[in-house]
Image: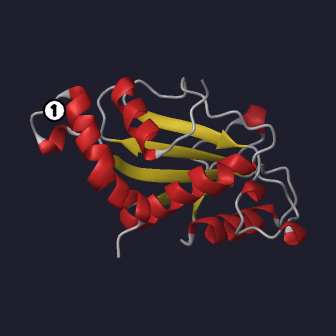
Amino acid sequence: MKPRLQEKYEQEVRPALATKRGYSNVHQIPRIEKIVINMGVSTSREKGALEEAVKDLGAITGRKPVINLAKKSVANFKLRKGQTVGCRVTLRREVMYEFFDRLVATALPRIRDFRGTGAKQFDGRGTYSLGLPDQTTFPEIELDKIKFNQGMDITIVTSAPTDAEAYDLLKLMGMPFAK
């Protein structure tokens, strides 16, 4: 069974984008390719911070996170090559649509004083990035078991060549952009 947002994309969003932008080929219509969720963990924190971040990110996404290692030593940050700096998960296909649905429908509205996401966070090639202040906005996280408040970066990669096309895609998919 297809996720709700995937059916919405195929039945409503794709035809709306085709008529609005005048695409002559079905493959020109932008789509979401993947969603990457990244949690950076400070090396100066306690020893259990990385394990907690991995556990929380696994609970949020339903996938086992990959641990990121530092590629270079940076003396100013007290960072050594090979030291753990965080964890990440890449979501594709059905899991990606389910996560996007939970992000838009439950997690973003639970942010305190939420007025919409910024429309200027595109990178120039159709990729949208946003940061969440902590992981407690997701209902999968139990507030009583939180030891560290950990923020996360969410990157939504689309096949759109321009920011305007990616904005139209995400707006039709339900992303609550600020006015």
Locate the N terminus by quadrant: bottom left
> Could you tell me how many numbered marks the image carries?
1
Is label 1 in a helix, a strand or a loop? loop
Residue closer to the observer: 79 or 133: 133
Quadrant of the image occupied by residue 76: top right
Q: Position of residue 94 (x, y in %)?
A: 39, 66
Quadrant of the image occupied by residue 25: top left
Residue placed under numbered mark 1 in the picture: 23
Q: Residue at x 48, y 36 (%)?
A: 128
Tell me: 35 left or right of 135: left
Residue closer to the observer: 146 or 118: 118
Q: Residue at x 62, y 34 (%)?
A: 117
Q: Position of residue 114 (x, y in %)?
A: 73, 38
Quadrant of the image occupied by residue 19: top left
The correct choice, above or below, for 2 with respect to 169 in the image is below
Q: Position of residue 100 (x, y in %)?
A: 51, 55
The correct choice, above or below, for 32 with respect to 5 in the image is above
Residue closer to the observer: 165 or 20: 20
Tell me: 42 left or right of 122: right
Tell me: 120 left or right of 25: right
Q: Position of residue 31 (x, y in %)?
A: 31, 45
